[in-house]
Image: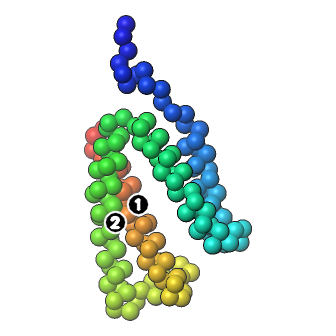
């Protein structure tokens, strides 16, 4: 009985993925609370953890089968693009002077904070679009 090359290749352990997830959640909670850790420290920590995140993402990607890879690629292409298009109303609101009114209830007040609001809006809407497209991909194929 011969084994195929893909079955003989040893899969990397999944514990680094879990550890990374716990770390990301801990940093996010600490950063959102603003009381536990200074914001500058969080920024430097994220910057330093980016290479580790890329490495762990590579391990995760290698573990995925072809269908899951295609689902993620398709969802990122279409979902993130759709999410990016949803940023246009925010840009229009900023252009006509209502952007600060939209950001103020969320705690964004000054000029620097409004820039952060814009950057986070793009990221959040792209990730939400990705999540919707990813779910659509799998529901359509089930």
Q: Tell me the residue at 61%/62% (across/down).
A: 45
What is the crowding at mark 2: few (fewer than 14 residues within 10 Å), some, or many (at least 20)?
many
Q: Is residue 4 visible?
A: yes
Q: Which residue is mark 2?
A: 83
Instruction: Please tell me whether mark 2 sits on a helix, a strand or a loop.
Output: helix
Q: Position of residue 4 (x, y in %)?
A: 35, 18
- Circles 1 and 2: CB distance less than 8 Å? yes
Dot 1 falls on a residue whose secondary structure is: helix
Q: Quadrant of the N terminus?
A: top left
Query: Where residue 20 appears, x then y in whole percent?
Result: 58, 49
In this image, 69 relative to 9: left or right? Answer: left
Front one among 12 and 21: 12
Residue 105 on image: x %, y %? 53, 82
* Number of other residues with Cα within 10 Å of mark 1, as a class: few under 14, some 14 to 19, many 20 or more: some
Look at the picture and state if 69 lies above or below 134. Answer: above
Q: Residue at x 28, y 57 (%)?
A: 78
The coloring applied to the image is rainbow
Which tag, 1 or 2, sits closer to the chain's start?
A: 2
Q: Which residue is mark 1?
A: 127
Residue 43 location (% of width, % of height): 58, 68
Q: Name the residue located 38 percent from the left edge and 15 percent from the top edge.
A: 3
Q: Is residue 105 visible?
A: no
Horizontal arrangement in the rendering, residue 122 relative to residue 88 (left or right): right
Give the Cα separation between the discs numbered 1 and 2.
7 Å
Q: Which mark is residue 37?
A: none
């Amino acid at each position: 009985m011969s084994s195929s090359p893909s079955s003989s290749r040893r899969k990397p352990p999944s514990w680094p993925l879990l550890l990374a997830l716990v770390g990301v959640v801990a940093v996010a909670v600490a950063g959102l609370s603003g009381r536990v850790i200074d914001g500058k420290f969080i920024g430097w920590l994220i910057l330093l953890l980016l290479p580790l995140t890329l490495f762990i993402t590579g391990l995760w990607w290698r573990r995925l089968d072809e269908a899951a890879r295609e689902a993620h690629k398709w969802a990122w292409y279409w979902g993130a693009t759709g999410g990016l298009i949803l940023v246009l109303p925010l840009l229009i609101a900023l252009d006509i002077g209502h952007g600060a009114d939209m950001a103020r209830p969320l705690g964004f007040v000054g000029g620097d904070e409004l820039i952060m609001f814009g950057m986070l809006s793009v990221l959040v809407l792209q990730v939400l679009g990705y999540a919707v497209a990813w779910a659509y991909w799998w529901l359509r194929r089930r």
